[in-house]
Amino acid sequence: MTRNVLNAPARSGWRLSIAAIALAAAVVAGWGGGAGSLFAAAVSPQDHDAAVEAFQKARDLYQQQDYRAANTANDKALQLDPNLPDAQLLHKILQTKLTEAPVGPPVSGTASKPANGFNLLNSQQISMIRLQEIHENETNIHGRVPAKTLREYWDQYVKNQVGADLSQTDYNNFTNPLNFDAQVKKIRQANIPALSQTVEITSDPKDMTPFRNSIHSWVLQNCATAACHGGEKAGGFRLYRPPGQSNDSVIYTNFYILSMYTPADGGRLLDRDQPERSNLLQYALPRVIALKAHPGNMDVHKFGDANNIEYRNISNWIKGLAYPQPNYGIVYELPGSSGPAPDPATKPAMSPAPRPN
């Protein structure tokens, strides 16, 4: 399978494989521009590093389909280092994209507030959730850490923890874009909010994949209906039901609401201490066997018993989430509530930790 070069981290001296070049050529077929002698100047190491950072930003914007902003960032990369092959290739691809469909960013990249006034998490808040939900053994994480953040982390945390006998080589190894997976986990572990809030994560943690692919749809179909928690009469607990296809902002907003909401009768919708006692599961069981029945007189059960395949899938998903419940560092007023959701007073979890028996 050919690797998607736009998902690959940029690094000094990186060269595209023949297969990747062939794939890129197919993408930009018919474009009449060429690099020519424009990309031939020598650059300083500092300009090269700055160009790599600009390209990484351009690549992430490209993945968000914000082609105009991606083109601006990529042009900056080429101004700093005209010889950067990644930026040369992206330049060609972007010219085709801008010619075909000069569009702005999708809703998922700039989420704020839909027409009905329902607040959605923005891209920075989504990154903060992703950062805390990443497993310690997880790899292939995509995103970007600004060079300034890496330097501040190194100066404020690493030197204080390890000592001052670190070399420039140690710093270069740490800041290498190939080390991105370790960078985000170490910054999370340091628990310095001013730094972790600058980390951009553009890929889902592995336990958010089943939520995106199946569990979120189950929640929309069974909890967020117009007659229940998806309409104007939802009361103190409301989920956002999009009129069309769900995007990152909708998915992560609903996940955050499920994670943070505390029902009036106690418990948690997602109980990370005892997943099978999660109200999300118990409310969907028949009242006669549920540990906690759904409030009100309506029998809303969706599972016959705990052997139901969807019940087991949701239970296993909750077991895989970060433990203990992490502090996302987000200020967000839950729909129907009178103030921001209280974040747990815990340090970021290096998920998942062992649960109590």
Image (tube, grey):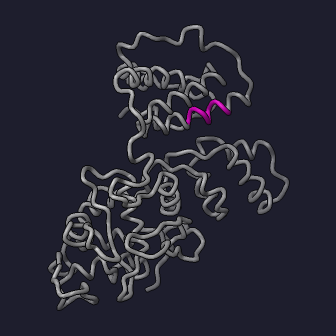
Image quadrant containing the N terminus? top left
Q: Nearer the viewer, residue 207 or 252?
A: 252
Query: In the rendered view, would you say 291 is above or below 173?
Result: below
| Most common secondary structure along the magenta stretch | helix
Q: Residue at x 25, y 60 (%)?
A: 217
Q: Is residue 248 left or right of residue 293?
A: right
The residue at 35%/13% (across/down) is 30
Residue 223 magenta-highlighted:
no
- Of residues 351 and 38, the one nearer the viewer is 38
Q: Residue furthest right?
A: 164
Query: Residue at horizontal 48%, vertical 51%?
Result: 123
Q: Position of residue 98 (x, y in %)?
A: 41, 24
Q: At x 64% / y 44%, what residue is drawn?
A: 146
Q: Is residue 52 magenta?
A: yes
Percent across and percent down for residue 313 are 27, 68
Position of residue 347 measured from the top left corner of the image (x, y, whole percent)? 60, 71
Q: Is residue 84 left or right of residue 110?
A: right
Who is closer to the viewer here, 231 or 45?
Answer: 231
- Figure label count: 0
Q: Is residue 182 among the parts visible in the rendering?
A: yes
Segment tinted magenta in the rendering: 50-56
**Where on the picture, by quarter, is residue 13?**
top right
Report if residue 207 is visible in the image: no
Q: The C terminus lies in which quarter of the figure?
A: bottom left
Q: Is residue 104 above or below residue 76?
A: below
| Whether residue 329 is situated above or below residue 195 in the rendered picture | below
> Could you tell whether 148 is left or right of 16 in the image?
right
Residue 336 location, x and y as percent?
A: 37, 73
Q: Quadrant of residue 294?
A: bottom left
161 horizontally vs 202: left or right: right
Asked whether 272 or 31 is in front, the reply is 31
